[in-house]
Image (tube, rainbow, N blue to C red):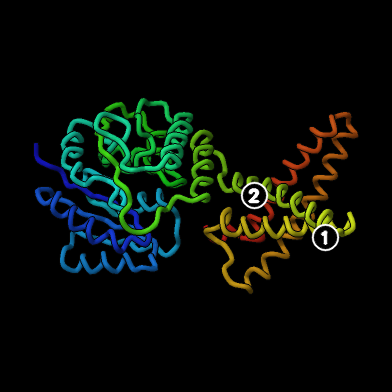
């Protein structure tokens, strides 16, 4: 059967040491194919994008999409697919952990299947020198992912796969780009049953640093919730998570001010509230509203007073709702919980529209 054009998308950030090696290897592996390699780079400080652009001057099959506003790994893949021209599409990492020699076999299998996945969880698959912590994280992520994926794919969290363009086109309009594993979201949207997994051993990273972080883990948990409940506003979920963290900050600093600094109870309460508001503002700015966050002092000085005002307004709303419900005969603690939810929702909407002005950035 005549081989179809293959478009391989590789998201990058600070992969200058790896990208030269990877492109050279791919050129060897794919030399018998009609192909294009699309590197989607998030404006890497190490100028990964420039290295790719230099390759492109000598080989028009090597292309670079340089993004100036980071939008995550999944969105990078979607953007790469959007500018691709192949009938077969693929994704792999730039960190040399994925075995590029597997690509010909994956493309061969794609002739009779709709998705082919490089899998660590089937015969001949595994992880090279991963420590127990990394293995535990991987196992936990796959276990949680089974809550949202109904098919029997074993390595749901694989970042190495190929698929037919028509599969992507069917789900393109529904993809949110949340999280860092686009395959996971595609699998939640498709009912494809012609899926094959091919075993390979994922290698250890040679150069650069792993992108796994606490922020990535939180993004993953939020994306799972959104995939499970499609109409869920993930930004609001983040806002609520930050609000919950503010309770911990509040209690911690209350103890510090009262027990260790021996301040009066009223002053301790007020200071603890203020610290938690500052903490919430910082976390919301760099996580919840990261796509329209304030980066300079002038913008922060404009945004923070609004945030503080809406926080105090939320406290008043919380108090009034709690008093009204408890006065109506509802349990005090349940009334308080409802008051917190109502106040948080209103607080989110006000900050969404007036503090970070998301509608203006959309």
Can residue 82 be spotted in the picture? no
Characterize the local packing of mark 1: few (<14), some (14-19) or many (20 or more) Cα atoms within 10 angstroms: few
Characterize the local packing of mark 2: few (<14), some (14-19) or many (20 or more) Cα atoms within 10 angstroms: many
Q: On residue 261, which mark appears?
A: 1
Residue at x 20% of width, y 35% of height: 110
In the rendering, at what x and y percent does residue 260 appear? 81, 57
Q: What residue did someone put label 2 on?
A: 242
What secondary structure is found at the residue carrying circle 1? Answer: loop
In the rendering, at what x and y percent does residue 200 appear? 25, 38
Relative placement, left or right, of 187 versus 2 is right
Quadrant of the frame with the N terminus: top left
What secondary structure is found at the residue carrying circle 2? Answer: helix
Marks 2 and 1, how far apart at CA: 27 Å
10 versus 303 height, above or below? above
Relative placement, left or right, of 10 versus 306 is left
The disc, 2 or 1, on the residue closer to the chain's N-terminal end is: 2
Number of numbered discs visible in the structure rendering: 2
Quadrant in the picture for residue 155: top left
Residue at x 45% of width, y 29% of height: 146
């Amino acid at each position: 059967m005549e081989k179809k054009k293959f478009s391989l998308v590789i998201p990058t950030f600070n992969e200058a040491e790896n990208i030269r090696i990877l492109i050279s290897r791919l050129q060897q592996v794919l030399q018998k194919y009609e192909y294009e390699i699309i590197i989607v780079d998030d404006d890497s400080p190490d100028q990964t994008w420039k290295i790719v652009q230099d390759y492109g001057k000598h080989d028009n099959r090597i292309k670079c999409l340089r993004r100036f506003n980071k939008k995550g790994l999944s969105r990078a893949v979607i953007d790469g697919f959007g500018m691709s021209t192949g009938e077969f599409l693929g994704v792999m990492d730039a960190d040399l952990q994925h075995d590029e020699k597997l690509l010909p076999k994956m493309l061969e299998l794609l002739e009779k299947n709709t998705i082919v996945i490089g899998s660590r969880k089937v015969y001949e698959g595994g992880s090279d020198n991963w420590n127990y912590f990394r293995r535990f994280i991987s196992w936990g992520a796959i276990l949680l992912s089974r809550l949202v994926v109904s098919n029997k794919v074993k390595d749901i969290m694989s970042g190495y796969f190929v698929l037919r363009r028509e599969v992507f086109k069917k789900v393109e309009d529904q993809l949110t780009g949340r999280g860092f594993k686009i395959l996971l979201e595609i699998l939640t949207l498709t009912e494809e049953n012609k899926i094959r997994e091919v075993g390979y051993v994922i290698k250890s990273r040679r150069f650069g640093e792993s992108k796994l972080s606490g922020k990535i883990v939180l993004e993953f948990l939020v994306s799972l919730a959104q995939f499970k409940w499609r109409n869920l506003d993930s930004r609001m979920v983040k806002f609520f998570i930050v609000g919950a963290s503010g309770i911990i900050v509040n209690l911690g600093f209350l103890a510090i001010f009262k027990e260790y600094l021996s301040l009066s109870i009223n002053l301790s309460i007020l200071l603890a509230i203020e610290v938690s508001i500052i903490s919430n503002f910082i976390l919301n700015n760099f996580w919840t509203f990261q796509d329209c966050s304030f980066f300079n002092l002038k913008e922060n000085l404009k945004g923070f007073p609004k945030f503080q005002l809406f926080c105090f307004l939320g406290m008043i709303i919380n108090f009034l709702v709690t008093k009204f419900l408890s006065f109506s005969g509802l349990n005090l603690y349940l009334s308080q919980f409802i008051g917190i939810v109502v106040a948080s929702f209103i607080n989110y909407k006000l900050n969404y529209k007036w503090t970070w002005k998301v509608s203006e950035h959309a």
